[in-house]
Image (cartoon, rainbow, N blue to C red):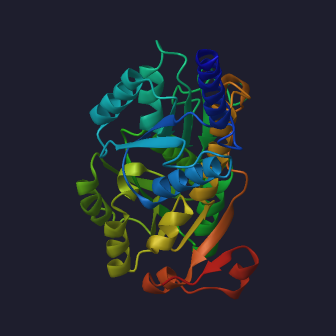
Amino acid sequence: MKKISMKLLVLFLASAIVLAGCNSSTTGNNDEVVIGVTQIVEHPSLDAAFDGFKKALEENGYKDGENVKYNVQIAQGEQSNSVSIANNFVADKVDLIFANSTPSAQTALQATKEEGDIPVVFTSVTDPVGAGLIEAFDKPGANITGTSDNHPESISNTIEFMINELNVKKIGVLYNAGEQNSIVQVEAVEEVAKNNGAEIVTASVSTSAEVKQAAESLIGRVDAIYVPTDNTVVSAFQTVVTVANEQKLPLFAGELDSMEQGAVAASGFSYYDLGYQTGLMAVQILKGEKKPSEIPAAYPESFKLVINKAAAEAQGVELKDSWKDIAEIFEGN
């Protein structure tokens, strides 16, 4: 009898442990999820997108340090580093890759071609179709989907403001010719400028160390400078602000985070919100509700023109009362 009772007791305790484990969380996400985060460089916009991504997961039951682990890797602007990061994530068999930028997404997709079961979710990508990431927004591909940081009207809204409100005739554009997303934007700026009787003067860089010199090369040749959502230039944006302030040369940006750092204005959106939007896609994938191929890629849900009052004053731009009807005013620090 004692032997039988002891066996029953052991079985009872084992069952209790299993049941306790099954009921330890109300989210249903008990197994730790590992997310590989690949980001080409560190700068405010990309960092904000990652913060928004994490918030979306947290609000849906994936808490950092509890049931989700983020393996964050920064490529420091080097494509070769980005390739190594993606290959390491595949070797480690992470549950999902969050690719934050066009180069990061391209290397992640390439690395996962043979391991098609690892989903890739991207953001901060200007032209995902042109970059070869997806076939179309409504049909992204086998293991990849995400969000673009190029609202269809954001570039035209800013460039037309520069031309119509500041009478800008020559626009200097700083960009890295090695970034596919930047090439697309420069072409768009050129088209809008041409259609509105203006022209562009480009200055290309390959590293962040070249940004200041490139900005200085535009002095005396342009009426204003425009910086697209270029990872290389934005990572050294303060050097452009310094040149613009010293020369009283109006500086405009392709996104709101750079505007807050010292550009006169930008038409854009919150990268935090874009990252959050992307995070909700990741949640559906992690919970097994949808495959990446079943989630259409998306643009930012909204955008707005914002004018930085302090930057305008520093760069010799006088604010017009009428601008309050078409833009928000950022007071600055």
Q: Residue furthest right?
A: 325
Question: Is residue 126 visible to the viewer in this orientation of the structure?
Answer: no
Nearer the observer, 30 or 160: 30
Determine which quarter of the picture holds residue 272. bottom right
Q: In the figure, 217 relative to 56: above or below? A: below
Q: In the figure, 84 relative to 236: above or below? A: above
Residue 71: where, in percent of width, then height?
A: 40, 41
Residue 332: where, in percent of width, then height?
A: 52, 82
Q: In the figure, 170 relative to 167: above or below? A: above
Determine which quarter of the picture holds residue 220. bottom left
Total numbered labels placed on residues in the image: 0
Nearer the observer, 6 or 200: 6
Residue 73: where, in percent of width, then height?
A: 36, 42
Residue at 69%, 38% (x, y): give it.
Answer: 23
Q: In the figure, 106 relative to 252: above or below? A: above
Question: Is residue 216 visible to the viewer in this orientation of the structure?
Answer: yes
Nearer the observer, 12 or 111: 12
- Give the position of the N terminus as an image quadrant: top right
Residue at 51%, 58% (x, y): give it.
Answer: 48
Q: Residue furthest top?
A: 114
Nearer the observer, 171 or 295: 295
Residue 43: where, in percent of width, then height?
A: 40, 57
Q: Residue furthest front?
A: 1
Residue at 46%, 20% (x, y): give it.
Answer: 112
